[in-house]
């Protein structure tokens, strides 16, 4: 079975940072992702969670409205709320995160090339960088997305 997700969208709010009891960093956030449905554009809001260095990176650099790319897996969990009701949560557990655009600054022209020239904190965090094939990022046209395309 395969459980891999790649999502590109915009942060709906500033990430919520915390540390769990073991001292590991955790950040929760959601991404607004547009899709076509019956010749109309609709927006899905996807809940996400990142851990460790990815969480630290997002806490330091990510803000509401930033365009972000994430890779991870879909997970589900449940818990009892304060009133004793069972709450079910489905979210993307991120393995890697990449800020594509922050504020009004343009997106990098070539993600793979940019990550080799800039320090890791300025370009994203990839836990297993040796497994990334740079050729995957050098194919296809660049996306030109204006701020008018954003749902917020």
Image: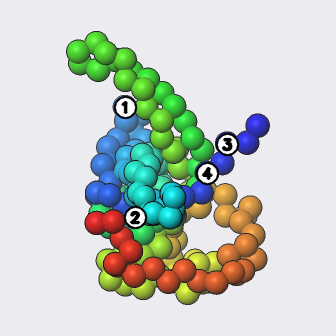
Marks 4 and 2 sit apart, C-alpha to C-alpha, by 16 Å
SS at circle 3:
loop
- Of the two numbered discs 4 and 1 on the same chain, state the one appearing first in sequence: 4
Question: Residues at badges 4 and 1 in contact (C-beta under 8 Å)?
Answer: no
SS at circle 1:
loop
Packing grade of label 4 (10 A; few <14, some 14-19, many >=20) is some
Q: Note whether 55 is above or below 99 in the view shown.
A: above
Q: Which residue is mark 4?
A: 5
Q: Which mark is residue 21?
A: 1
Q: Quadrant of the C terminus?
A: bottom left
- The answer to which quarter of the image holds residue 105 is bottom left
Question: Residues at badges 4 and 3 in contact (C-beta under 8 Å)?
Answer: yes
Marks 1 and 2 sit apart, C-alpha to C-alpha, by 30 Å
Q: Which mark is residue 10?
A: 2
SS at circle 2:
strand
Residue furthest top in the image: 84
Marks 4 and 3 sit apart, C-alpha to C-alpha, by 7 Å
Residue 9 x, y percent position in the rendering: 45, 63
Q: Which residue is mark 3?
A: 3
Is 17 on the left or on the right of 36, as rendered? left
């Amino acid at each position: 079975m395969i459980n891999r997700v790649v999502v590109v969208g915009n942060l709906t709010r500033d990430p919520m940072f915390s540390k769990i009891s073991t001292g590991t960093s955790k950040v929760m956030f959601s991404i607004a992702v547009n899709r076509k449905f019956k010749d109309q554009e609709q927006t899905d809001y996807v809940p996400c969670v990142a851990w460790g260095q990815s969480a630290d990176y997002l806490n330091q650099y990510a803000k509401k409205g930033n365009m972000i790319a994430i890779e991870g897996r879909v997970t589900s969990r449940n818990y009892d709320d304060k009133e004793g009701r069972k709450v079910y949560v489905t979210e993307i557990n991120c393995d890697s995160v990449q800020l594509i655009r922050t504020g009004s600054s343009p997106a990098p022209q070539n993600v793979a090339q940019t990550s080799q020239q800039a320090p890791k904190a300025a370009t994203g965090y990839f836990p297993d960088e040796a497994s990334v094939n740079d050729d995957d990022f050098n194919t296809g046209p660049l996306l030109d997305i204006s701020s008018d395309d954003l749902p917020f």
